[in-house]
Structure formats: C-alpha cells, structure tokens
C-alpha cells in the first residue's frame, strides 16, 4: 500500500490550515526576493512557496515567468542567461517604480533586489529558528525538461531533504514533472496543481492515491463540485492564491490543509494568529 501524504496540520493547529507565503509576502514586497521571504517569516508564515527555473549554467533560481519583462524590465529569458547575468538585474524596482521620487519611501538595500537562488532560500529556511515548510513549484514547459526536477532533487539532497520527513514538497501543473519527482525521490510529497476544474476528471485516474491536490481558489468558488469531490475522495487539498476573507472562508468550509497566500500575515490574523 502506498503511503498517504502527511497532513500539513500540526496537532495543536488541527482546526485550521497551514499558511504558506506565495512567492514570499508578495502583496507588499517584490515577489521571490529574499526580502519577501524574510518578511513572510517575520509575519509568522508556516511555509514558503516558490517557483524555480534553471539558468543556462545550471542554477535553480526563484523566478515565476520564463521571461524577465515583468520583474526585471528586460527582454531576456531565464533559461538563456547565466546566474551572473541575472545577478546584474534588479528584481525589485518594478514593485514600486516611483520610490526614488518618494521622500518617505524607505531606503532599499540593493541586495534585496538580487535574483534569489533556490539554494539561498533553502539555507535561509535551514538556519531559521523554527520549522518552516517549503512548497516548490517546477515550471513547465521548459527547454531543460526533466533536468529541472533532477537538479531540484539533487539540491534538496544536499540538505538531507530528499526523503521522508523533508520540509519540502514539490508542486507542478505538469503530470510528467510530478511523476518524475516521485521516481527520483519516492518519499517526497508531491502536489498536483489543477488549473481548471474540468481538468480534474482527466487527471483523477492518473495521479497517485497519496498525492496532494492543489486547485485554485477561483475554481473552487466557481465550481463547488470540485471541492466536494476532493473532500469525498479524502484528498489533502492545498489552495492557491488565497488573499481575501471570502477566499479563506471557501477553504475553511472545505477543511483544506494549506492556503497559499500573497498576504500570509493577514491570513494568520484572520485565523486568529
């Protein structure tokens, strides 16, 4: 019998979902920067979510988009650039482009705007003074295919986090990617992300019985049958991106195990701390 995934709810918090910071505390702070993750930890986030892409010289970096137009104001592609080239870019100014003209805007450390490597994020979590989970999404399609998951598992292995008891779980919208992770690291939890409710009937016979399911909150709201089916099937549910009180209530009504939010501090406040 295959193992069931471990619940994200600790015994003392069985009445509420785990709060996971989506790309860090990204509502207020530039996403995927170290500053965003430090802020999320300061706010009490119990997990950190990140997207990873592979650079041309083989480094995993925390960047959502395949191109850099939105977050670094350049036409380059992550997959065609080296880590050194990415390190020359500013990944923070887009969030507040008028800050230099605002006398009341806080001074920003240039380091806060540097590209964040997955290894640096893992080191931050490893050195933190309390347990923090990691929800790591691999982005597909990519020119590197399965090399992304292989590099990811190898990097987790450097921390001893490629086995049972790891704080990391791997997420993807790609069924091939999730299967690949399960082959490379059979004891790691995997999350099958679901973009559209009508995709679930196709995915249902293909995913493992112990896989976590990750639907978007809008799909749960617009298609309530999806959540009801997942609950009846006994699936552990992690929901993205939960940013409002109404979003959270949808998740609480279903008894989900984790909510992934741009506003982790606000979610924790709504949940009572």
Image (cartoon, grey):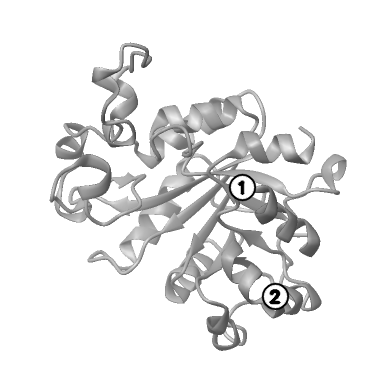
Instruction: Assign the C terminus to one quadrant of the image.
Output: top right
Q: Where is residue 209 in the image (x, y as percent from the top left)?
A: 69, 76
Q: Residues within 10 Å of mark 2 (few under 14, many from 20)?
A: some
Where residue 32 appears, as percent x and y from the top left, is 40, 40
Specify few, some or many for label 1: CA neighbours under 10 Å numbering under 14, 14-19, or 20 or more: some
Quadrant assignment, res 89: top left
Q: Is residue 145 above or below residue 268?
A: below
Quadrant in the picture for the N terminus: bottom right
Q: Position of 111 compared to 257: left or right?
A: left
Mark 2 or mark 1: name the one nearer the start of the chain: 1
Task: Name the quadrant containing residue 230.
Answer: bottom right
Q: Does residue 57 appear in this view?
A: yes
Quick check: marks 2 and 1 in contact, CB under 8 Å? Answer: no
| 242 with respect to 49 (left or right) | right
Secondary structure of the residue carrying numbered label 1: loop
- Observer-nearest residue: 117 or 255? 255
How many marks the image carries: the answer is 2
Residue at point 36% right, 54% down?
151
Q: Mark 1 points at which residue?
A: 166
Q: Which mark is residue 241?
A: none
Q: Where does label 2 land, which residue?
A: 224
Q: Quadrant of residue 133?
A: top right
Residue 6 visible in image:
no
């Amino acid at each position: 019998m295959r193992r069931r995934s471990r619940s994200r709810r600790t015994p003392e918090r069985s009445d509420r979902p785990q709060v996971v910071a989506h790309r860090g505390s990204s509502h207020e702070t530039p996403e995927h920067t170290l500053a965003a993750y430090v802020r999320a930890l300061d706010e009490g986030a119990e997990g950190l979510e990140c997207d990873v892409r592979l650079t041309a010289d083989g480094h995993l970096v925390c960047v959502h988009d395949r191109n850099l137009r939105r977050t670094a104001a350049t036409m380059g592609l992550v997959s065609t650039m080296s880590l050194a080239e990415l390190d020359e870019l500013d990944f923070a100014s887009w969030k507040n482009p008028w800050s230099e003209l605002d006398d009341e805007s806080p001074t920003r450390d240039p380091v806060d705007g540097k590209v964040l490597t997955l290894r640096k994020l893992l080191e931050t979590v490893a050195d933190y003074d309390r347990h923090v989970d990691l929800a790591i999404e691999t982005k597909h399609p990519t020119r590197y295919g399965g090399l992304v998951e292989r590099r990811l598992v190898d990097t987790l292995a450097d921390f001893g986090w490629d086995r049972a008891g790891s704080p990391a779980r791997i997420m993807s919208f790609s069924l091939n990617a999730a299967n690949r992770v399960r082959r490379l690291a059979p004891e790691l939890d995997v999350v099958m992300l679901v973009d559209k409710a009508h995709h679930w009937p196709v995915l249902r016979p293909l995913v493992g019985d112990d896989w976590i399911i990750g639907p978007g909150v809008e799909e749960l709201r617009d298609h309530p049958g999806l959540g009801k089916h997942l609950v009846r099937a006994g699936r552990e549910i992690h929901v993205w991106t939960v940013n409002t009180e109404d979003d959270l209530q949808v998740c609480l009504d279903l008894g989900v195990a984790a909510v992934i939010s741009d506003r982790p501090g606000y979610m924790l406040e709504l949940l009572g701390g």
